[in-house]
Amino acid sequence: MLFRVIGYTGTAGVIRLFVGLISQKAIAVFVGASGLALIANLRNLLEVLGSFSSVGARNGIISEVAGTKDTTSLRLLFNSLLTLFISASIIVMMMLFWQQEWIALQLFFGKPSGSLVLAVLFSVPFVGLMVLVESVLTGKKAFKAVSNIQVITAVFTAVSMVVLLYFYDLKGGLIAILLRPFFGALLYVYHFKSTPYKSMLPDRLAFDVSKIKTLIPYMAMTLISVGCVHAVEVGLRTLISTRIDVESAGLWTALNGISANYFIFITAVFSMYVLPRYSEHNTSFQLLKESKEILKTLLPIVTIGLILVYLFRNPIIKLLYTSDFMSITSLFKWQLTADWFRAIFLVFGYYLVAKKRLIDFIVIELFSFSVLIGLSLYWIDVFGIEGIIMANAVRYIGCLVLVVFLLRKKLAK
């Protein structure tokens, strides 16, 4: 099963990577490094709002659906989640409307763009709906369908990005980001209605508190993680633009974008195989044995892939961006080091999520962001943006050591 997931999601990941290259190239050509930073900030906002509109339940839904076979129970779970998501979306939209100007000033480096943030408001419910249906399909291990829809959505986003950037410059690129949730949600719902799982669709909205209670640890973990990740990214981008300049913030964002593109494949394997596998109610499950099998299969592929990225970093930058971005070549060694340790860390980190070990999860998150922020604040004046990439590498090395320590008793069994 793991080989099947890796093979299919790997192929889909390559296609999404190629499509992502088109979007990033268009952004670099039409709006440059500073525009790239602004578009990245909007993406961060949309991710945070999406997590809050879906109350951070994505991993919990995957885990619960993977471990539940009863159709009636799944139908009630889906219905309760849909009701919860609609309610959460309304609250998020109200908050967004109330604080639109303040949010715009934080995201766009002091430029008043409240009307743009207001446009985000209409995307919020669709993000939640997309998360719900995708999570159910992932929990049922429908990895082919999920991968196909992700590819189609990526193609649509890339095409709309190029067209809108060409005609409307930066504003067009920002609008393309906002169109993605609409299109993705429509695709997921359309596909879901043609699957055997369509019986889970409710006739009317209902809410069962007992179904939501089991998801609370997952919600807490996701909201803490996603909220912190995107808040820290925006904060670091602002730090770079303040201590150095906006162009440097764009260069840092460009390197993160390259990392995000090849990490699509890795995260797909974790969400589609590792999390459902850890969540299954299997009395013979042994963490050490399972993690060894995953690492033995996944790590050689990841290692070879990262080495190839390093060797071809110059052509990759020229392909993705423009010659103005060539200065980030010296930063690859730190970014690839961080991603290699991150891949190993996630093998153990996803166990904490699957087993709802909330306290351990919070300890690791606090450690992770404290190291990243602390070292970034100190090293940015010494090494520039390289200091932030170095801080990220140290962060994941530390996280790996910490998670193994926290799971030492489980690994010893």
Image: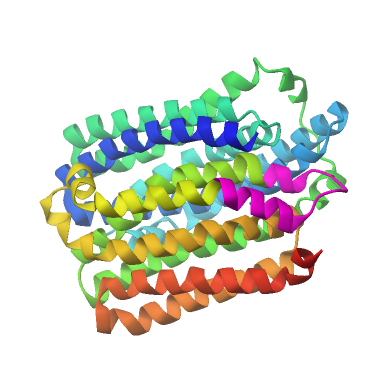
Closer-to-camera residue (47/155)? 155
Q: Residue at x 53, y 39 (%)?
A: 127
Query: Quarter holding the N terminus?
Result: top right
Q: Residue at x 73, y 54 (%)?
A: 289
- Asked if residue 202 can be seen in this view, the reply is no
Q: Residue at x 42, y 55 (%)?
A: 100
Q: Would you identify the image quadrant in which residue 136 lies?
A: top right
Q: Residue at x 20, y 69 (%)?
A: 245
Closer-to-camera residue (399/98)? 399
- Asked if residue 83 can be seen in this view, the reply is yes
From the viewer's perspective, tell me whether residue 309 is left or right of residue 291: left
Q: Position of residue 50 (x, y in %)?
A: 54, 47
Q: Is residue 208 above or below residue 306?
A: above
Closer-to-camera residue (227/327)? 327
From the viewer's perspective, tell me whether residue 5 is left or right of residue 248: right
Q: Main secondary structure of the magenta part?
A: helix
User: Magenta includes 43?
Assistant: no
Q: Is residue 355 above or below residue 261?
A: below
Q: Position of residue 386 (x, y in %)?
A: 28, 72
Q: Position of residue 208 (x, y in %)?
A: 85, 41
User: Magenta includes 288?
Assistant: yes
Please provide the residue range marked out in magenta: 275-297
Q: Residue reaching furthest left?
A: 323
Q: Position of residue 160 (x, y in %)?
A: 30, 30
